[in-house]
Amino acid sequence: MYTSVFNWSGGKDSALCLYNVLQQKHYSIKYLLTTLSESSQRVSMHGVRQELLEQQAQSIGLPLKQVLLPQDASMSAYNQLMEKTMRPLQEQGITHAIFGDINLQDLREYREKQLAQVHMKAVFPLWGQPTGELVREFIALGFKAVVVCVNGRLLDASFAGRALDEAFLQDLPAGVDPAGENGEFHTFVYDGPVFTSPVKFTVGEKVHKTYAPASDPDDNCYAKEDKPAFDTGFWFCDLLP
């Protein structure tokens, strides 16, 4: 088996990808790796609190490495920070980094290029699979998730805080990817076959924030230059540990 680090967002794609990797047994996962905002102590873009992320990792049973991103960091600063994070992992004998990305070609090429600089290989177990089939597989396997962030240009506030289930999928407007692969929505997974016990939380308030993606590729709408590509509004549903 290849020794690897698993890039963990805490959402549905990560959870389904992790499940598949553990079933296939081609990779030995040494760490979960997550980026968080240094100022808010929350998972980048998802807005999930650090405490809940740590509870996920504890229930999964894998060590968690957290990368804290400075506020308004440029893309070049992000790249330097990730290289500083990944190089020691490569020196530990980790040869592969696993991602739950499905079909964003520019994001895949970006990850491959950056990892090549530290002599590591990117792996995409879900790549190219139909997103509708993947999200329904996620539900059928018994995973439980709550929608924690929605793009306000595409979905109204009522979608935030909902369970990711068949009813949610049926209510999505035309043109919205069923897995939110284009950044339409993000989720927090709290139970399922990779967990030893459910992560407990309470649904908190919904807040609207204007967000300018500038430095984190895991936002699924990141800018490749140092300046933001656009500003847009998002509805976040806070989850309380």
Image (tube, rainbow, N blue to C red):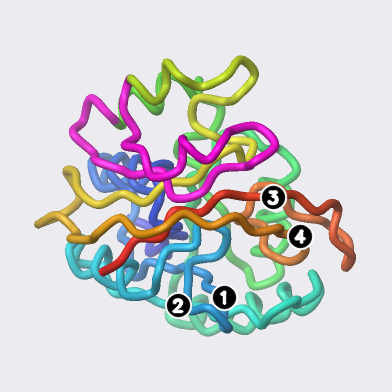
Q: CA distance from mark 4 to mark 1?
A: 14 Å
Badge 3 marks a residue whose secondary structure is strand
Q: Position of residue 46 (x, y in %)?
A: 50, 57
Three-letter amino acid code of the residue under disc 4 = Ala
Estimate how packed mark 2 is, as few (under 14), some (14 to 19) or many (20 or more) residues with alpha carbons within 10 Å: some
Which one is in front in this view, the residue at disc 2 or the one at disc 3?
Answer: 3
Residue holding disc 1:
37
The residues bearing labels 4 and 3 have C-alpha atoms spaced at a distance of: 9 Å
Give the alpha-carbon distance from disc 2 to disc 4, as whole Å.
Answer: 22 Å
Left or right of residue 8, residue 203 in this image: left
Categorize mark 1 by other alpha carbons within 10 Å: few (<14), some (14-19), many (20+).
many
Q: Give whichever of discs 2 and 1 has the lower sequence position.
A: 1
Q: Amino acid at mark 3?
A: Gly
Q: Earlier in the sequence, mark 3 or mark 1?
A: 1
**N-terminal label among 2 and 3:** 2
Q: Earlier in the sequence, mark 4 or mark 3?
A: 4
